[in-house]
Image: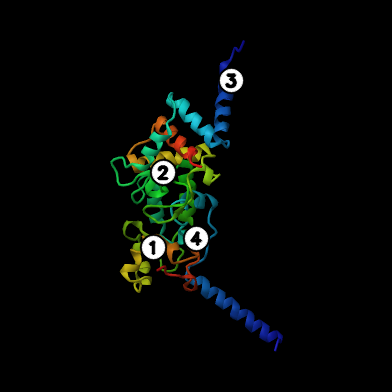
């Protein structure tokens, strides 16, 4: 019987915060977004989202290439961008905070809004399927 | 030949040469690791000395609208990077305190003057793409080295 729930809530929040800083695998991240979306991820839908434009000038593929299994090139600065598909770049999708940061920025550039959990799950499903 | 005097003269000459080599890039500030991590994902880590403090401050205040892209960062990182950038701003000897148009390094008077021999057709080559792509020609730009000897203009 816990008479004071505050410490356990605090402990839970701390555990979550430290989890966020922990390394993850691309599969775990996909599973996380899928759970948030509450529906199965679909790689084909992810590919479609990645390669199409969404009312703006750039698609994801404008910088990352399609399929993003080799280095891409920043559409405005020309700087090389390392391959995005995890099988071709083991550093990809291993840091949840970094993944969230880039989804936030790049979805805003490509779609003018944040991406939904379902869209992230779909894109990750496609990227994870590239071997 | 190797008298102490010769060695002193040689040493002084080498020091002078070293200073001359540095003069073009200004004092080279070791980049803050976080600056490289956050900013050099999309472009080289532009040396902070290439813009005046007012320009860096404005850039860092408007990261969600950063030259056509969303470069937003969390508040703590913005403040850390802005502090470092403004502390090391304007050290390149040609940078004045007056911000260049749109706070663009590439529109600074010294930049335009320094590149006036580069034909317009070079800038539009696929390998160059943009004047912001220093690395296209300044092969050591990501090390803060813009020396003439390290320039290779791509075909």
Of A49 and B51, the residue lying toward us: A49
Residues indicated by labels 2 and 1 sit on the same polypeptide chain? yes
Subunit under mark 1: B
**On-image quarter of the N terminus of chain B:** bottom right
Dot label at residue A8? 3
Q: Are marks 3 and 1 on the same chain?
A: no
What is the spatial separation of the Cα atoms under label 1 and label 4, in whole angstroms?
15 Å
**Residue beneath disc 4:** B142
User: Which mark is in front, 2 or 1?
Assistant: 1
Query: What residue do we see at 43% from left, 36% from top?
Result: A123
Q: Nearer the viewer, residue A131 or A76?
A: A131
Q: Residue at x 43, y 66 (%)?
A: B137
Q: Quadrant of the C terminus of chain B?
A: bottom left
Q: Chain of mark 4?
A: B
Q: Residues within 10 Å of mark 4 (few under 14, many from 20)?
A: some
Residue B12: x and y in percent read 61, 80
Residue B63 shows in this picture: no
- Residue corresponding to mark 1: B128
């Amino acid at each position: 019987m816990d008479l004071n729930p505050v410490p356990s809530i605090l402990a839970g929040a701390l555990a979550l915060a430290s989890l966020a800083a922990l390394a993850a695998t691309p599969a775990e991240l996909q599973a996380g977004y899928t759970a948030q979306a509450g529906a199965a991820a679909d790689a084909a839908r992810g590919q479609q989202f990645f390669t199409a434009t969404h009312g703006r000038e750039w698609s994801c593929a404008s910088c990352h290439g399609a399929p993003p299994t080799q280095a891409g090139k920043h559409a405005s600065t020309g700087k090389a961008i390392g391959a995005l598909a995890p099988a071709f770049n083991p550093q990809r999708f291993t840091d949840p905070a970094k993944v969230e940061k880039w989804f936030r920025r790049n979805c805003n550039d490509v779609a003018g809004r944040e991406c939904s959990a379902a869209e992230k799950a779909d894109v990750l499903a496609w990227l994870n399927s590239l071997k | 030949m190797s008298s102490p005097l010769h060695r002193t003269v040689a040493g002084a000459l080498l020091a002078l040469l070293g200073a001359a080599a540095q003069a073009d890039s200004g004092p080279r500030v070791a980049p803050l690791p976080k600056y490289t991590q956050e900013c050099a994902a999309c472009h080289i880590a532009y040396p902070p000395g290439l813009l005046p403090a007012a320009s860096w401050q404005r850039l860092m205040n408007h990261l969600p609208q950063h030259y056509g892209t969303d470069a937003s960062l969390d508040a703590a990182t913005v403040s850390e990077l802005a502090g470092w950038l403004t502390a090391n701003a304007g050290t390149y000897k040609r940078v004045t305190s007056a911000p260049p148009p749109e706070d663009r390094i590439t529109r600074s008077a010294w930049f335009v003057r320094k590149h006036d021999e580069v034909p317009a057709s070079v800038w539009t080559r696929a390998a160059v793409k943009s004047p912001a792509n220093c690395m296209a020609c300044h092969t050591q730009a990501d090390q803060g080295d813009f020396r003439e000897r390290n320039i290779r203009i791509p075909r």
